[in-house]
Image (cartoon, rainbow, N blue to C red):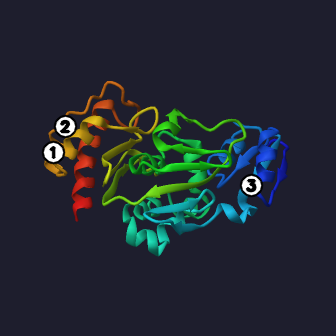
């Protein structure tokens, strides 16, 4: 690694000052530290959020779960209230990467990084969640802007994510076995505001699929999803899967997710 200094602030305000001054924020480190080891990233200063107690934790607030940005995947997956009230979110968290990744990775780090094949962005977008930062609140539909790009401003820190609890929800994915990232993942929710379908792993970033949402709003059944043609023209094609294969996966995984959500 290159030489760098490590700061461990105890408050969000102190972390924000360091980040605003150019410090690179370190959450779970599952992407950043690997990049540093490969010398693809060389920050002069790391701002470790691990010592800020207020950034970790899970609480139920009315009809929503508020999850602190530094909450580990393992803790989300094991939380009894989430398992009972929003089991799809608990299942997603419990199936990210491997146990070592889940023990270190954080929800805030995953969402801020916005890897195009990450699992959490699909849950955030499909839930219509709200990203809470040290400066403002950002709706999920306005947050994810593209490949590793979000609406976060320079030095802005995610402090929590607020998930409305849907009536029904499920997540299905097909893993790329070498990396454990999904070739495609589909998160489906049905709530008071309608049906939302978010897809990860298939394009330049997480996205909603209007055709599937419209079909499932009329009939929340696997058969309705099966009747939707998925356009492959803007989907990824690489050594792991063609765009056409990913298009078929979106349809198949949506059917499975709807079936799971229906119980």
Report x, y in % for residue 119.
45, 50
Q: Which residue is mark 2?
A: 228
Q: Name the N-terminal-most of marks 3 and 2.
A: 3
Dot 3 falls on a residue whose secondary structure is: helix
Q: Left of 1 or right of it: where is 246?
A: left
Residues at circles 1 and 3 in contact by the CB criterion of under 8 Å = no
Q: Left of 28 or right of it: where is 247?
A: left
Q: Residue at x 55, y 47 (%)?
A: 111
Q: Nearer the viewer, residue 160 or 113?
A: 160
Dot 1 falls on a residue whose secondary structure is: helix
Q: Residue furthest bottom?
A: 80
Dot 2 falls on a residue whose secondary structure is: loop
What is the crowding at mark 1: few (fewer than 14 residues within 10 Å), some, or many (at least 20)?
A: some
Above or below, 60 relative to 3: below
Q: Which residue is mark 3?
A: 12
Report x, y in % for residue 71.
59, 62
Residues at circles 2 and 1 in contact by the CB criterion of under 8 Å = yes
Q: Nearer the viewer, residue 15 or 44?
A: 15
Q: Residue at x 33, y 46 (%)?
A: 196
Instruction: Report the Cα–Cα distance between label 3 and label 2.
Output: 45 Å
Residues at circles 3 and 2 in contact by the CB criterion of under 8 Å = no
Q: Which residue is mark 1?
A: 224
Above or below, 178 relative to 65: above
Q: Name the N-terminal-most of marks 1 and 3.
A: 3
């Amino acid at each position: 690694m290159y030489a760098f200094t490590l700061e461990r602030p105890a408050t969000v305000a102190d972390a924000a000052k360091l980040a605003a001054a150019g410090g690179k924020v370190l959450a779970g480190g599952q992407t950043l530290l690997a990049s540093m080891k490969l010398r693809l990233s060389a920050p002069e200063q790391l701002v470790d959020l691990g010592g800020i107690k207020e950034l970790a934790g899970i609480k139920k607030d009315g009809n929503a779960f508020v999850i602190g940005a530094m909450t580990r995947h393992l803790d989300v997956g094991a939380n009894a209230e989430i398992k009972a009230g929003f089991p799809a979110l608990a299942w997603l968290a419990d199936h990210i990467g491997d146990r070592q990744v889940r023990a270190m990775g954080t929800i805030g780090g995953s969402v801020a990084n916005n890897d195009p094949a990450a699992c959490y962005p699909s849950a955030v977008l499909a839930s219509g969640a709200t990203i809470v930062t040290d400066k403002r609140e950002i709706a999920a539909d306005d947050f994810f802007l593209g490949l590793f790009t979000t609406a976060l401003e320079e030095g802005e820190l995610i402090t929590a994510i607020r998930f409305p609890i849907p009536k029904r929800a499920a997540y299905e994915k097909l893993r790329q076995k070498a990396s454990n990232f999904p070739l495609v993942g589909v998160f489906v929710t049905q709530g008071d505001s309608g049906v939302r379908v978010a897809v990860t792993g298939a394009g330049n970033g997480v996205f909603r699929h209007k055709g599937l949402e419209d079909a499932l709003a009329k009939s929340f059944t696997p058969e309705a999803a099966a009747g939707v043609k998925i356009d492959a023209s803007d989907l990824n094609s690489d050594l792991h899967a063609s765009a056409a294969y990913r298009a078929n996966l979106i349809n198949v995984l949506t059917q499975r997710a709807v079936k799971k959500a229906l119980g």
